[in-house]
Image (cartoon, rainbow, N blue to C red):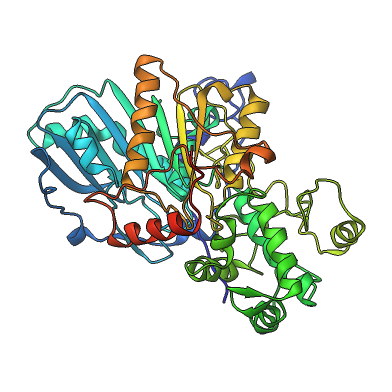
Amino acid sequence: MRRTLRMTAALALAGLVLHGCEHPDNPPDGQNPPPVDPEETRGQDSRTYTVDEAALPFTALSNAPESDRWWGTLEGSGYRIEVPKNWNGMLVMYAHGYAGTASTLNVSTPSIRRHLLENGYAWAASSYSKNSYDVRAGIEDTNALALAFTRIASERGRPLEAPRKTYIIGHSMGGHVAAAAIDAETLETANHKVRYDGAVPMCGVLGDSELFNYFAAYGLAAQQLAGYPASGWPVEDWALIQPGVKAALFKTYPTEVTPQGDKVKQVVKHLTGGERPLFDPGFSGPLARSIQDLLWGTFGGSGTLDGILNRDGISTVDIQFQFDADASLSAEEQAFNASIYRVRGDPEANRLRRDGLRWIPKTNARISVPVVSLHTLGDLFVPFSMEQIFKRRADAQGTSQWLVQRAIRGVSHCDFTTAEQVAAFDAMVQWEQRGLKPQGDEVLDPAVVSSSSYGCAFTNNTVGPDDPQTTGLIRASIVSAYPCPAR
């Protein structure tokens, strides 16, 4: 099975006619201005998506403060907005995660909705105008909704002042949206510009395209160690060889590995953040099957991500494959790294563009507002290494003073309790408004990350009324099997 991803953006060609000209009415030397080639389009740009307007209405939250609720469409996106009667003047934009490749667009409400309403915050969420992994659309449409907030409120009969603070939060792909939305490159290149006051990316793709490099690296390592080494990219016969690869690596997929499968497991451990609590159940525990199926569904696929890019943008050239925690490579590791097929993506595939954001917007960590991020340790789909990549970027940019990261002892993707998310949001707000920088976790020191107590500080297993019923069961099993050491 090949997992496909798509992406889009509307071209702002009207703005391009001024590119490179002194003034349209006064061309140099009396000559006509040189023509400007329009930006190239891609597969995603021609795909049509439709808002499911019947699904936009949403009901009041039980036992929550009274509010005004509005919904509708804006620039090809659906939206929901909720403003409590006791509005505190602040707006929280919510960015949803990957919604698949279907042509129907839907809006998601934030998981901390109750907390926002109880504390006077308004919130707004866009469906985005395109599905698939379209972070460019996610940013533009979320920003467009933030900019339209007061106009929509006025049209619905409740004139409001412009928000005195605007924050952005998001899950998974929405975490990518949130982290890129506050980046200086986005402020420089987006068509809809919003200067957010703080962000909370949760289980976010904070390494942007590095996520897809990881997918490729995992798949290529699995092939190599199973005796089916790749000789090209994309792997055209992946569907045919996948059963043989699994048989060579797993006695029972994915819970019991063979000796070669154990090497794959070690490779994945170090690709996803190194030795740490909760990696084992994330890779092969009772809840691992669904995530592993998602991962294996990406293997062998095109580096264009089915229309997100026009050229292959995936690269595994700089990835170091390891079978143990020793950073120096053994002879076996050296041989493996020398022999494995390397994908060499086109460096121009995700270049800067003249018509707005990159097709895969960057999370450069060029940040100047408080960011508090959350990530579960067992997540292999958007792995903990995304946090490490983002921290290295912040260190390189000299912006680490704006970043606080928290590790959570969850075994799957976005496996948070509402209490953990609320704590992160409140910590960001306290930091932004009162200058009280919150505590976080060290993410780059292997000795710290590998500790049996890592992730205990900010894990809160309290299950509330807005948590799924399964959350309590999952967290109870984690506490039983992987308890935090007594303090």
The mark tally for this picture is 0
Q: In the displayed structure, would residue 378 be above or below residue 296?
A: above
Return the residue nearer the eye: 387 or 1: 387
Return the residue nearer the eye: 30 or 231: 231
Q: In the displayed structure, would residue 61 be above or below residue 43?
A: above
Residue, x 46% and y 50% (percent of image)? 173
Q: Is residue 196 left or right of residue 375?
A: left
Return the residue nearer the eye: 442 or 355: 442
Q: Is residue 42 left or right of residue 241?
A: left
Q: In the displayed structure, would residue 206 be above or below residue 45?
A: above
Residue, x 86% and y 46% (percent of image)? 328
Please identify the quadrant where the N terminus is shown.
Answer: bottom right
Q: Position of residue 133 (x, y in %)?
A: 48, 55
Q: Position of residue 272 (x, y in %)?
A: 63, 52
Q: Position of residue 29 (x, y in %)?
A: 64, 19
Q: Quadrant of residue 426?
A: top left
Q: Position of residue 196 (x, y in %)?
A: 39, 27
Residue 206 appears in the rendering: yes
Return the residue nearer the eye: 350 or 426: 426
Residue situated furthest top in the rendering = 435
Q: Is residue 111 left or right of residue 228?
A: left
Q: Is residue 70 left or right of residue 101?
A: left
Q: In the displayed structure, would residue 265 be above or below residue 78?
A: below
Residue 193 appears in the rendering: no
